[in-house]
Amino acid sequence: MKIIKRDLVIIGGGSAGMRSALSAYEKDPTLSILLIAKKPLGVGGVTAQAFSDRMAFHATLSYTLPPQKNYLYHALDIYKIGGEVSDYNLAEILAKNSESAIQYLISIGVPFVRDKEGKIDQFLTDGSIYPRACYVGPNTAIEIAKALHRKIKETKIEVMENVMAYDFILKGNRAVALKAIDTSTQEILVIQAKAFILAAGGAGEIYHQNVFTSEMTGDGYAMALRAGAELVNMEFMQIGLCHPNILFAESGSIFRALPKIVDENGKEFLLDYLEGEDRENLCALEFKKGAHWPVSYESPTKVIDLAIYYHTLLGHKVYMDFNNNPSYLIFEHIPDEILRWSEKVGKEIFKDTKPFERLRIINPTIIEWLKKYGIDLEKDRLPVQNALQHFQGGVTQVFGKIAGESAIEFAKNKDFVEISEEDLKEEIKTIGIPAEKARKRIKDIMSSYGFLVRIEEGINKGLIELSEIRKEGIALDEHGPSYYLETLNMLDVAEVILTAIKIRDESRGPHLRFIKFEPPVMEFLPKKENWNKYIVIKKKNGKLSYEIREPVRPREDIK
Ligand SMILES: Cc1cc2nc3c(=O)[nH]c(=O)nc-3n(C[C@H](O)[C@H](O)[C@H](O)COP(=O)(O)OP(=O)(O)OC[C@H]3O[C@@H](n4cnc5c(N)ncnc54)[C@H](O)[C@@H]3O)c2cc1C
């Protein structure tokens, strides 16, 4: 076992981890800073790999509208799009510091697109009243990751790649060392530090359908939980329409071009699962889907996600066809809101055109981008499925910076704490469900009961099945110790998520609770005003407990 000592250790090499490492270093380059990442920088995590046709960094710049108090409008939008279940004061910090965050990214070489006057261009996107989305193109996050990585290489920040953190060693309520494993050699490492930053990203891999890199098994959440931290809002996660094989969210312009949505037999199946107004308004709904991505209870477009989900459940594959118009697209019936929007983009883009031509007008970049992945929309149909996109977050530059600065300050004022033989004892079970099998069961449970459609009976069943896995235990198998440790983490995270899903007995944002789901009959548990609160889950003496907490609300003067 190798023992390492550094002043500050950052766990995770995505946008959050890299930004925090840089801000810590910029504050005090004399302390030793180590960043560990489970996959090489630029290979692992969502920042370095995922993209969408409207990938953007939201910022309030000096000229962002409205002319006065612009960042307060931004904060309020964050709070509202967050379902009013997160702390407003954090939203205000995020909005207020977004300009300095983007200036930093520009200073390290992120090539944000500018308008004719040289100002950073901003477009309007879901949840915003004013345009704030700054972009490089589909690769906005990838460009951010590249720039942060380049900058790290110019510093003395030490980076260890292919190293997976799996537990903290605690003294009192402080983490004093980290247990980690080299995923290539399976050697155990113990890393003592005065301060740690946990930035290990989301837990997409606990679902079969996700747009995460494969190492994202929720280790950070599980480690934090076992160390006594509170996990908040775990029932909320973005589920949207994505490509099944590449990490690509099929949002904005993809839908606005109004492609024909078909199955493997070319059947336009959406109408089969819709009724009443939804059937009549399908054209408008499909268009709106471009602005209402991902699924949200508050958006009428959720019926499209649910129809695709149901059709897939019946064993079909779903595609977007850009060479044929949907049967329900009749120019004379196109709602005014679409025509008004289309006048801005190019006159009458829906008249006598095909979806491919429209996409070429709306967002030509994405057509070229997809060709890099072997998809030519002029010939090929674009596969689509519901997939887990992000857990709470965004390209976390503001809180990454704050975390780095406060952790380095903390490290300066602390000493190392000795650890004992007892702390290093490890229990690896060899009796129980082999890790691979257990992992599959966890993913099956979460994908069936804790994904898009959440029904009381299924949630209870899922919780029982997870507790059975815990009772039987997970055993080391031929995939080795790091795979085994990941699987234990997945079980911890799955239990927390499903528990939170059960407690919130309403629908809100991406959390869709149903009384009945038999399309076209989709009976939701409605949104409840008394649920404008968040769920906090902790683990104490090996047991989960929860608290329902009132968020910090917006100040009276800015509501
Ligand atoms: C398709 C898609 C579109 C998106 N669009 C937008 C958008 O338009 N705007 C926006 O703001 N956000 C968007 N997001 C969200 C945003 O990309 C993420 O929230 C953000 O990039 C996450 O950064 P992160 O540093 O927290 O995690 P990641 O970038 O996922 O990095 C996690 C890091 O932790 C490492 N790691 C994991 N486990 C361990 C462990 N046990 N030990 C050591 N290291 C570990 C990983 O290898 C990786 O280096 C999108 C996400 C997706 C998937």
Image (tube, rainbow, N blue to C red):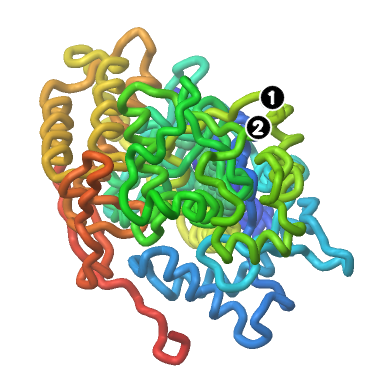
Tell me if residue 163 can be seen: yes
Q: Which residue is under mark 2?
A: 323
Residue 143: percent from left, percent from top: 72, 44
* Amino acid type indicated by mark 2: Asn
Residue 107: percent from left, percent from top: 79, 58
Residue 102 or residue 377, whichever sits in front: 377
C-beta proximity under 8 Å, tags 2 and 1:
yes
Q: Which residue is under mark 1?
A: 379
Residue in the picture at 35% in, 8% down:
478
How many numbered discs sit on the rendered protein? 2
* Amino acid type indicated by mark 1: Lys
Residue 214 or residue 408, whichever sits in front: 214
Left or right: 246, with 365 as reference point: left
Of labels 2 and 1, earlier in sequence is 2
Residue 474: percent from left, percent from top: 22, 21
Tell me if residue 156 can be seen: no
Residue 346: percent from left, percent from top: 76, 57
Residue in the picture at 68% in, 68% down:
100
